Image (cartoon, rainbow, N blue to C red):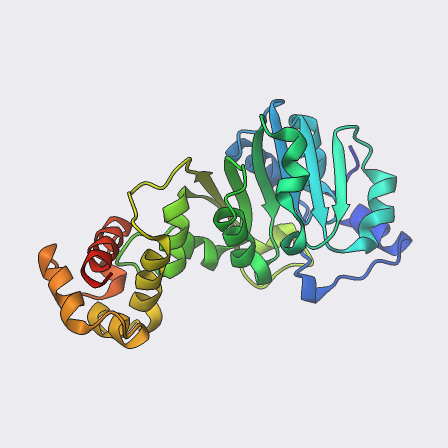
Amino acid sequence: MNNLYSPAYVKKIFKKYNFRYKKKLGQNFLIDKNINEKIIEAASISKDDVVIEIGPGLGNLTQILCENAKKVISIEIDEEFKQIHEDILHYDNLEIIYDDFMKVDLNKILEPFNKEEVKVVANLPYYITTPIIMKLLEEKYPVNKIVVMIQKEVAERFASPPGNKDYGAITLAINYYTETHYAFTVPPSVFVPRPKVSSAVVVFDVLDKPKYRVYSEEVLFNVIKGAFAKRRKTFVNSLSSTFPEYDKDSIVKTLEHFDLNKSIRGEKLSLEEFVKISNYLMEMIH
């Protein structure tokens, strides 16, 4: 294993290959082995697992993944790493694909592993965290667990309970597809270059099927989106002004049917309540 946890060694590598950090790609490299080992533990990586790693960077986490998993497929957008990877990452169970994760066909990549336990483990760039997570969930890839390091503020939003200031549409979308928990906080001091904010590791256990019976996912997510479109307004006013097809009378009747206050705001409603409301609205209007 290369000593990618030594700032001096990392600096030497970058100098040798004339590598420059690309701020637009959110390149901050973790140089703390203990944190990576905690990520492996949070993901429960074993020799039965196929792991998709998004943005391996220098390969700090990649090395530990290769030593613990059956197969590691790393997807890296920055081809400038190619020569570095060829020189320092020598693992028979590693495959590196140089492409934009948002454009790759993950089903095709995972085709040979249709009976394997597949996990996604990554230190994600802050600027594209939510699109990556939602791609993994909405496309319903055969992934069992997602363990990612992301900006702490975003992690708190993903794992927020109803009523919290961080609770929003993205929280509900993620909770629809997964069981989510905030694993641990990571300080800026363990990265090169050092980011301005703290990070956190979040674990998403992907559900085989949604927790609740939903008549229409489209209607459910429209209701959720409408509820948070104007956060300062009540659920009734925010939803009716965002989606006029849901008139105020119908929304009020729906809330009354479930003994919910007509002045309630979206942030106070649980996922189960959103499901009940959307199902009932669909019956009334459609």
Residue 3 placement, left or right of 179: right
- Location of residue 181 by image quarter: top left
Say which of 15 and 73 sits in front. Answer: 73
Residue 228 placement, left or right of 132: left
Q: How many labels does the image show?
A: 0
Is residue 61 among what the camera can see? yes
Say above or below: 71 vs 186. above
Residue 242: % across, % down: 32, 74
- The image quadrant where one finds the C terminus is bottom left
Say which of 247 and 129 sits in front. Answer: 247
Residue 53: % across, % down: 65, 42
Say which of 158 and 214 sits in front. Answer: 214
Q: Residue furthest bottom?
A: 241
Residue 34 placement, left or right of 251: right
Q: Residue furthest right?
A: 16
Say which of 18 and 73 sits in front. Answer: 73
Residue 152: % across, % down: 48, 55
Q: Which residue is drawn at 57% across and 33% down?
A: 118
- The image quadrant where one finds the N terminus is top right
Q: Which residue is drawn at 63% across and 50% down?
A: 190
Q: Residue at x 67, y 25 (%)?
A: 70
Q: Which residue lies furthest to the top in this view?
A: 47
Residue 14: % across, % down: 83, 54
Q: Residue at x 89, y 54 (%)?
A: 17
